[in-house]
Amino acid sequence: MQSTTLSKATLSRIPLYLQYVRTVNSDMISATIVARNLGLGEVQVRKDLGMISREGQPKVGYPVRKLQRDLEKALGIHQKISAVIVGAGKMGTALMDYDGFQEYGLEIAAAFDNHASEVPFKHGNMSIYAMSNLKSFCQQYDVRLGILTVPASAAQDAADQMVASGITAILNFAPCHIRVPAHVTVQQLNVALALAHLNLMVNQGKKEQEEMHYGKQIV
Amino acid sequence: MQSTTLSKATLSRIPLYLQYVRTVNSDMISATIVARNLGLGEVQVRKDLGMISREGQPKVGYPVRKLQRDLEKALGIHQKISAVIVGAGKMGTALMDYDGFQEYGLEIAAAFDNHASEVPFKHGNMSIYAMSNLKSFCQQYDVRLGILTVPASAAQDAADQMVASGITAILNFAPCHIRVPAHVTVQQLNVALALAHLNLMVNQGKKEQEEMHYGKQIV
DNA sequence: TAGATTGTTAATCGATTAACAATC
DNA sequence: TAGATTGTTAATCGATTAACAATC
């Protein structure tokens, strides 16, 4: 079908499919096998994949590499996307060293911190700049995506500066709610909360393998 | 109503409510105001809060502190929960230093790493042990919750050891799918993916503030 | 051909929204 | 009392599942 309108639910499962498909070595794969390995419903997977790719063939299934490319396209990661990190504390620097971004076509352009000196500090092959440079940097490199890793007490202030710098999407690690103008999207990624939620699921005996991807969700 | 069966959707919004309610200073708060501040539907919030707490009163709303307690109860964080970290690399140690767990009644009991010596290594007031100690530790302290922060290539092996140690819930930071027995729950928390998803939402102009909590989360 | 698989159409289920009644 | 709010019941919407047709 490959329509432009993937449902929210389907969209949220794409990461899961992609992650799995990347580990498959054979040439072809069927929705049945994907479903079994991921613990999802067979029909659901078939419908999802049908929406995402046209390459499915009866009896044989999908060509793995083509399916992978279609999944990546659907996720919008077929082109490089740049993001900045605001807050170069423990979590911020850990993310600077995180090697998982590449796989999703993402690139951390630079990090910014209140406590950074005016002279850029090198961390690996990335730089940590003072917050005062955020606006000019984002405008120069046309960066719209930001990861917020400051303490909760500084989050709102930092978010305001991000918005003023042209950031339109914020992934917020700080365990607090931040207010932003309507044109800006915020996604919470609260590790403690993810853990608490997981604990809850287990204690309730609800055993549903959930893709929290985004901490949402999501996560 | 305060029934035992909160819907999945409601459950996934509790973290958002809790985070917000904790920042409220007044004595009472109405669903209307919560909805406005969180960008959710008024009726939805009213229904959610009604399921979670019985303290709502017409004309005045909910007593903030009681509502907070009920939210915490619903999330199951009214008692201390212990978790271990497996993989004491950049991300693992960053999480050891993360101060957000307390707020959700969570406590990191210890960390474990393949590269750790047999002599426990002190990190702050926590210890990093060799993987060989995982099983005895989990059994001694009855730990069921684990955070997996090893590289993707080592994830399956580490997960197997966690399962063998009695862990029944795994929060997996490694960007890969891991296989576990049916009684074990895995939740993916893929930062890159959360970011890619966020980018997608923004590019599609879909501006829905999503609680990814768990990378939800959330992603 | 027969069997495995895809893809589609209809039925069910769950969640959101809308309308309204109840209450302090 | 009047108004703001909660809570409930019914209607709508979206997603999942089930049944079946199409295809290599």
Image: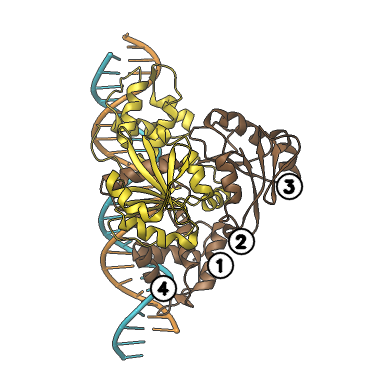
Chain colours: A yellow, B brown, C orange, D cyan
Tell me the element at label 1.
helix
Q: Residue at x 31, y 23 (%)?
A: A56
The amino acid type, in three-letter code, at marker 2 is: His
- Residue A41 x %, y %: 43, 34
- Find out whether the residues at labels 1 and 4 contact each other: C-beta distance under 8 Å: no
Q: Can residue A159 be seen in this view?
A: yes
Determine which residue is flagged by label 4: B30
- Quarter of the image holding residue C19? bottom left
The amino acid type, in three-letter code, at marker 4 is: Ser
Mark found first going from the N terminus, 3 or 1: 1
- Find out whether the residues at labels 2 and 3 contact each other: C-beta distance under 8 Å: no
Other residues around mark 3 within 10 Å, as few (<14) / some (14–19) / many (≥20):
few
Mark found first going from the N terminus, 4 or 2: 4
Which one is closest to the eye, mark 3 or mark 1?
A: 3
Q: How far apart are marks 3 and 4 (CA)?
A: 42 Å
Tell me the element at label 3.
helix
- A144 relative position to A203: left or right: left
The disc numbered 3 marks a residue on which chain? Answer: B
- Residue A9 x %, y %: 36, 43
For residue A155, above or below residue B195:
below
Determine which residue is flagged by label 1: B69
Other residues around mark 2 within 10 Å, as few (<14) / some (14–19) / many (≥20):
some
Q: Distance between the residues labelled 3 and 1?
A: 27 Å
The amino acid type, in three-letter code, at marker 3 is: Tyr
